[in-house]
């Protein structure tokens, strides 16, 4: 399969690209390398023979195009799907030692919101790969943490609950350690 990933050097896009490459897929990535952080992330995948950074001009057909945005993914195949994201967290996200930024809102790691809604990026990616191979998804898929008890106005037939593969604090400590090691890159605009 060949994928086109739009916003491939957004922190979520980078993780999606990396996960698909690790699973042997060919990736064309579209993104402006207009920050130091994006330039740094581009170097991680730029030498992989399965990855190609392309302009917005697409010269071939793709099995799927994935548009990466802060709170949703738009997956375009023969039947487009909007995947509404949970509070995904992981390496390279906008953050500091105390919390993360999601849609210009600061969410502290020690809050009930983070504990109930947070999903580690690796747990999310395992599910995403399964959805990319599915031919029977609704036009909108709402993804939630299995700990998220807020069930107002949710169509259950369009909702998927993800269980973190390991305790959320263990994943959070991994992310915080990564942040401390690469703090100077996190701070690049």
Image: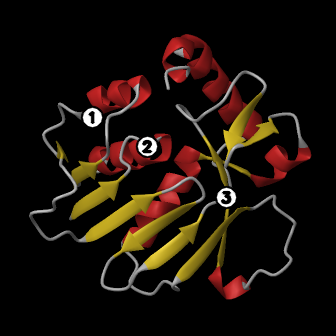
Q: Nearer the viewer, residue 171 or 158?
A: 158
Q: Which mark is residue 161?
A: none
Q: Residue at x 34, y 55 (%)?
A: 6
Give the mark nearer the N terminus: 3 vs 2. Answer: 2
Q: Residue furthest left?
A: 59
Left or right of 62? Residue 103 is: right
* Local crowd size for mark 3, using a 10 Å CA cut-off: few (<14), some (14–19), many (≥20): many
Give the mark nearer the N terminus: 1 vs 3. Answer: 1
Determine contact: label 3, label 2, CB under 8 Å. Answer: no
The image shows residue 111 at horizontal and vertical percentages of: 89, 40
Q: Nearer the viewer, residue 168 or 52?
A: 52
The image shows residue 138 at horizontal and vertical percentages of: 53, 86
Residue hosting label 1: 45
Q: Is residue 122 above or below residue 84?
A: above
Residue hosting label 3: 86
Residue hosting label 2: 15
Determine contact: label 2, label 1, CB under 8 Å. Answer: no
Q: Residue at x 69, y 25 (%)?
A: 173
Q: Is residue 138 above or below residue 14?
A: below
The image shows residue 49 at horizontal and vertical percentages of: 13, 39
Give the mark nearer the N terminus: 2 vs 1. Answer: 2
Q: Residue at x 69, y 39 (%)?
A: 101
Left or right of 136? Residue 77 is: left
| Mark pair 1, 3: CA separation | 26 Å
Q: SS at mark 1?
A: helix
Q: SS at mark 3?
A: loop
* Local crowd size for mark 2, using a 10 Å CA cut-off: few (<14), some (14–19), many (≥20): many
| Mark pair 2, 1: CA separation | 10 Å
How many numbered discs? Answer: 3
Left or right of 97? Residue 67 is: left
The image shows residue 123 at horizontal and vertical percentages of: 57, 51
Q: Could you tell me which quadrant the N terminus lies in?
A: bottom left
């Amino acid at each position: 399969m060949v994928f086109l990933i739009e916003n491939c050097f957004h922190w979520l896009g980078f993780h999606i690209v990396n996960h698909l490459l690790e699973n042997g897929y060919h990736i064309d990535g579209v993104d402006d390398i207009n920050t130091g952080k994006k330039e740094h992330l581009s170097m991680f995948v730029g030498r992989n023979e399965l990855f190609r950074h392309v302009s917005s001009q697409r010269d071939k057909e793709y099995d799927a195009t994935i548009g990466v945005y802060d709170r949703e993914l738009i997956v375009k195949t023969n039947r487009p799907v909007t995947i509404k994201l949970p509070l995904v967290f992981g390496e390279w996200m906008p953050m500091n030692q105390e919390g993360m930024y999601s849609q210009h809102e600061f969410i502290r790691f020690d809050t009930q919101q983070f504990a109930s809604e947070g999903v580690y990026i690796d747990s999310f990616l395992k599910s995403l790969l399964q959805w990319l191979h599915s031919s029977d998804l609704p036009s909108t898929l709402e993804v939630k943490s299995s700990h998220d008890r807020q069930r107002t106005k949710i169509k259950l037939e369009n909702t998927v609950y993800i269980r973190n593969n390991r305790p959320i604090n263990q994943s959070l400590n991994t992310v915080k350690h990564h942040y401390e090691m690469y703090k100077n890159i996190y701070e690049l605009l």
